[in-house]
Amino acid sequence: MSLWSGAPINNYKEHNLADQLPEVRRLLFAEKTAEAEELLWKIIQPSSKLHRSHFGNSEILGYLDIESSAQSAVANYRRSLDLDQALAQVTYIKDNVTFRREVFSSAADQVIVVRFMADQPGQISFSARLGRPEFMTTESLDSDGLVMSGQLRGAEGKGANGMKYMARLKAITKGGRVSSADGKLQVKGADAVTLLIACGTDYQPKPKDFRKQSFESTVVKQIDAAAGKSYDELRGKHIAAHQELFQRVRLQIGTPDAKLASLPTDLRLMRYNSDDPGLIAQVFQYGRYLLISSSRPGSMPANLQGLWIGSTNPSWNGDYHFDLNVQMVYWPAEVCGLPECALPLVDLMNIVAEYGRQTARLCHAAEGWAVHGMTNPFGYTWPRPDNRWGYLPGSGAWILQPLWEHYAFTLDEEYLRRVWPIFKGAGEFWLSWLVEDPKSGKLVSGPASSPESQYFAADGSLRGLCMGPAYDQQCVWELFTEILEAAEVLDIEDGFTKKVAAARAQLQGPDIGKDGRILEWSKEYRERDRKHRHRSHLVGLYPGRQISMATPDTFQAAAKSLDGRGSAGAGWVPPWDAGLNARLRRGDRALQNINRSMRHGLLINLLGRGGREFQMDANSGLTAGIAEMLLQSHQGFIELLPALPTSWNKGYIKGLRARGGFEVDLTWDNGRLETATVKSNMGNSCRIRYGSLARDFDVKKGNTILLDQSLKM
């Protein structure tokens, strides 16, 4: 849903910040960090204050309130979510009548459907309202419907001058009667009832490109079309569309335990320990379910909370954080067989790239486009005056990695040509932005921060800015590598690509400190928090590829860096650690990270513990981490079971994807590979590795090879 308060910023030109950058850089190179930060915040603060008033936040459209007048006691209440069919169900008994309710959101028909059923005729009676906390008018529509509409706060948060929206509710009854008056639906004595909800907004990132047809008429057409179908038709079409995506991947770990599987999820999570691998498989699929449900072609991409923000003022604005969160949301898309679900991010990045050109020019004196730690649907790209998270140019390079991965897994050249301008614009920015370190001669980014982390400067003060933090340097190496590989595929060799190749060769690479860890900043500063939850200086290990077994020194330094961070933190921290440990081939440690997330992070997400809102990134990160333990393909070959934990003695995975257009099924027993099935969707040769074994295969398009534990056909 694209409902946001706020508005686009049209006055960037009034805030030219770039003139002071040479002085900021001079001060940072001279290690006069306090003076550098003071100067930078002085020039950013006025524009940042104005821009905050335009930024807005993602908002829930509204609530459907159902009220039943009967006060009888309820027995045998059960609420469930079927991941395979994407159906939420409620059943209970009241006055010896069994009631059942099903709810689903149909991507196929673009409606939310709520079905009320009972095992005896004439038993369903209730009232229904549409509402939200503010900026809302609800009216009755005919005898069986309601319409809710309004306009949110826009620029500077003043009044209702922002985005418009509309939701329509329609009731279809079997038996009984339905009436609508004073913004309220009343159903009495029905055998069954279907409620349909369709909604839309006037969100227009590029008004000249949008259809002339109003969003209101689209909503009317959607609900009328759905009303012309039976409930069984709507349900069947929804399930088919969902399962076409969901059933591509199957996972089983260990032997299914019917007793554990019968437990309610909250109890199962609260008693979770490593003897319940079936719950891990369920959580793996839950992450895929969330991505399917919140990111489809034509929709807005999933944000930190997916679609489940639950209020008009969500934490973190319900926005798009580019210093980790959005990337993690999309980590499982390609490897877990959901490439379509990654495409909405392309649409958002087209908007960011367009508006980010002003930021590159006015804030960085650079060509191309730039973005810092966050954006919104209006293409916000400006930095904020905070040395922990406000000035993060490296995020603009990292957020393109999911776009590259879509090509790497699918080898879709038409897609690659479509996104090439976004990559080229990002490359142009970095060619303009990078400068030579006067001591090393290497190219470094700056001023820049390492997300949310700080160090003690020479004067004892806490600082965050420097020249050449590992986060930026690794993100830019990944971007330059993606650009060069894309140019080779697209047969592009020009002055731009030659400059990118030369700049990559001159980049300051991962540096190792005296204690054997990768340096987070350009100098060996004392960290404020050595156990800090961000692993930003390890993006080159995972999800990147700059640090791997092919670079043994930095590979070992990355392992020591990760171990030095400790195991504190919940939310997205354990899933990221699982992926990092999987890349380090440490399956048992990766499982420890998963167990920690199951015991802590998911209790917050699923059960509302700790007073925190739902965070989708942790769920996606878990799914991606599990996949990474079973299959890797980032080093130019397909590696089978690279980080299988000792306790996952047997199991199977079907439908994982590998870079190069391959699909892989695996079975294992006694902790060893049993069979591997590899299908080539594009007809390429591949190298397959398992442990110390490695073999090359040439698989024709559409063909499949079956391998045993010795990688023999």
Image: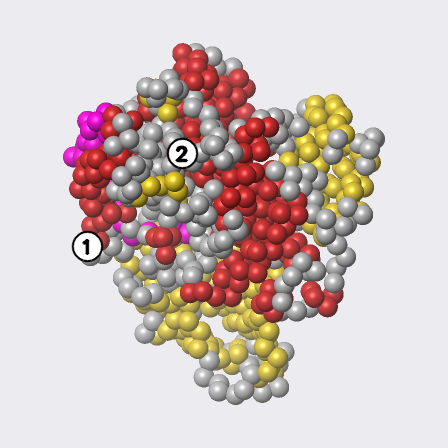
**Marks 1/2: CA distance?**
47 Å
**Residue 378 seen:** no
* Apparent side of residue 500 relative to residue 7 in the rendered image (left or right): right
335 above or below 649?
above
Q: Which sits in the foreground, 171 or 441? A: 441
Residue 190 appears at what percent x and percent y?
53, 77
Callout 2 amino acid: Glu
- Residue 713 spot, x, y in % from top left: 83, 31
Tell me what residue is drawn at x 36 percent, y 27 percent. Answer: 445
Range drawn in magenta? 1-25
Pinpoint residue 137: horizontal percent, then vertical percent: 29, 65
51 versus 698 height, above or below: below
Residue depicted at 75% across the width and 27% down the height: 694
Quadrant of residue 530 in the image?
top left
Residue that mark 2 sits on: 524
Depth check, mark 1 against mark 2: the one in front is 2
Within-10-Å neighbours for mark 1: few <14, some 14–19, many 20+: few
